Amino acid sequence: SQDKTVPDGWLTRESKGKRGPSLFLLSPDGEQFQCRRLALTSLIKNGADKDEIENMRAMIHHEGYERSPLLPENWFYRDVSDTVYHIFTETGDLYDSFFSVKEFMSNNDFPGDQISDMDQFEKEKLKFRQINCSKWEKNPYLPPGFVSRPSGHDLVILSPEGEQFGNRRTALQ
């Protein structure tokens, strides 16, 4: 039966390896790919039909890639770990840091508002990470809703609004 996570005409097979199961894709032309992102990149770079590209692009979410209104059209991001994001561009390029993707945007004459949106996206992702860091703990010496975590010999304090402080004095001002 047709796998609904790939476009019509594509096939998938699962392989059990040392690191667990892996999914492979087989294009209608017989080319094999290790993931949808690589298949999409190949379609883009090889000038495939626009509909074929869009059909595969619609499947990229099955690998955890998401859209954001702050990213340029047809760009996606994915949380890879607690400290790494992947940003996948419309042209099939993959970036693993905000610095490198903003450098790419600057070097390729992206409009200032798109670069500003990328700055905002980076700030939002950083704030989300800070709030969701698993090391935050309730602290009886802080007001309700505030949490703290160790950082070297100090404590970092997080307000209920997501703002971080380097000490109690500045957090409570």
Image (cartoon, rainbow, N blue to C red):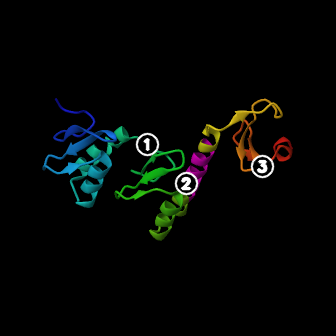
Image point (25%, 56%), residue name: 42
The number of callouts visible is 3
Q: Amino acid at mark 1?
A: Glu
Q: Circle 2: is it few (<14), some (14-19), or many (20+) Cα within 10 Å?
A: some
**On screen, residue 103 above or below 33:** below
Q: Which residue is mark 2?
A: 117
For disc 3, the marked residue is 166
The magenta span reads: 116-128
Q: Main secondary structure of the magenta part?
A: helix
As helix, strand or loop, the secondary structure at mark 2 comes to helix
Quadrant holding the C terminus:
top right
- Percent position of residue 41, x then y: 30, 55
Quarter of the rendering occupied by the N terminus: top left
Q: Select label 1 or label 2 by which is in front.
A: 1
* Cα gap from disc 1 to disc 3, whole angstroms: 33 Å
Q: Is 121 within the magenta?
A: yes
Provide the residue designation for mark 1.
66
> Whole-percent x and y of residue 69?
49, 46
Q: In the image, what residue type sits under mark 2? A: Asp
User: Residue 49 at x, y = what percent?
Assistant: 21, 53
109 relative to 63, above or below: below
Q: Tag 1's secondary structure?
A: loop
> How far apart are the two marked residues, 3 and 2, measured between alpha carbons?
28 Å
Lateral position of residue 79 relative to residue 48, left or right: right
First in sequence, mark 3 or 2: give its number: 2
